[in-house]
Amino acid sequence: MRLPLPPDDDVLLIGRRPLRAVLARGVADAVRWETTVCGFTEHPDGVDVHLAGARDVRVDVLVGADGVRSRITPALTGRPAARPAGVTAIAARVPLGVPGAPPVPGDLRHGLAFGYGPRGVGVFLALHRPGPRPAPEAEPPYLVWSVAAAPERFSGDPATTNPAGLVDEARRLLRGWGRGSRRG
Amino acid sequence: MTLLGDAIHPMPPTAGAGAGTAVVDAVHLAGDLAALPPAAALRRYQRRILGYAPRAVAAAVPALTWQRRLGYPVVRALAGAVALPLAGVVVRAQASRLSTRDAKTTVLSE
């Protein structure tokens, strides 16, 4: 199976943190950090946004861009933004270009990789490597790995497992996997 | 009132397109708000989303579906568990109740 990507183009990836920094360029003064929205009230000529521990803010348009755990979505539509997908994943980033860094499969230079194994265990790999003229927001190179499976394949709740325990869990889920890979 | 990104079209990360689609949403919304009064801008923006977001979500779902099928060879996989549950709802609930003065937008970020 191939991901629906242009066959001859490289895929450009950007980390969440540098993406946010790039998006905030030029509007840093307008961003209020560490402010929790706890509700809103609509009026004929605008929206009052209720903030935790701060005075309401009146705006013309309120855009809920707060992700799959959005607080705005249920208030607006009566339903949560997302439902569980039936797959739980552990993900980590490994610094590259430092002593002890792992070898990186060459295919990752052209895009991300997704692999399937027995018992519904999947692996996701993505290489983050700044280009020749990196933006100031760029991070040093790193590899993202992720191991995903149905929730009941996990021996414990990943949400309450410490990082070392998560690595052990990932190794357990990948037991029997070889070092090689085959393109699908 | 409107929604943007995963808050309206939750996407599994398997196509790596979640943030990119959210940025596309933001570009459309900014353009529409700059060109039209808020109520009309939000209507146009929400119609636009229906034109591309379902495809983007659909492109990301097969990887998850395959993973579930391989995990449960007998049980029929719950295809469409990650779908586009809300876009239609929001379009129906679109706020024609907003005024037509110049928009000042607050974007709530995670």
Image (spheres, coloured by chain):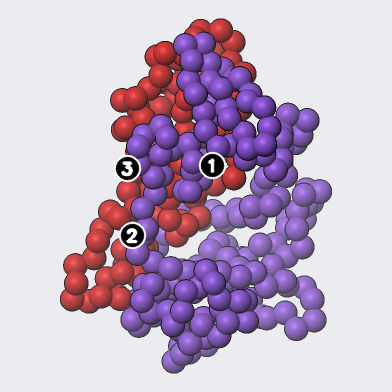
Judge by depth and name the residue closer to the eye, A182 or B93.
Answer: B93
**Chain bearing mark 2:** B
Left or right, A122 with reference to A32: left
SS for tag 3?
A: loop
Q: How many residues crowd mark 1 within 10 Å: few (<14), some (14–19), many (20+)?
A: many
Q: Which chain is purple?
A: A
Is residue B31 shown left or right of residue A53? left
Chain to which mark 3 belongs: B
Question: Which residue shows up at 52% across the image and 33% down it?
Answer: A39
Q: Which residue is labeled 3 in the image?
A: B85
- The residue at which mark 2 appears reads as B62
Q: Looking at the picture, does residue B72 appear above or below residue A31?
A: below
* Circle number at residue B21: none
The residues bearing labels 1 and 2 have C-alpha atoms spaced at a distance of: 25 Å
Considering the numbered disc 2 on the image, is that residue within a helix, a strand or a loop? Answer: helix
Question: Residue B36's spot in the image, x, y percent?
Answer: 51, 12
Image location (x, y in percent) of residue A169: 51, 82
Distance from disc 1 to disc 3, alpha carbons, whole Å, reads: 16 Å
- Residue highlighted by disc 1: A66
Q: Secondary structure at mark 1?
A: loop
x 53%, y 16%: residue: A46
The reply to whether discs 1 and 3 touch (Cβ–Cβ < 8 Å) is no
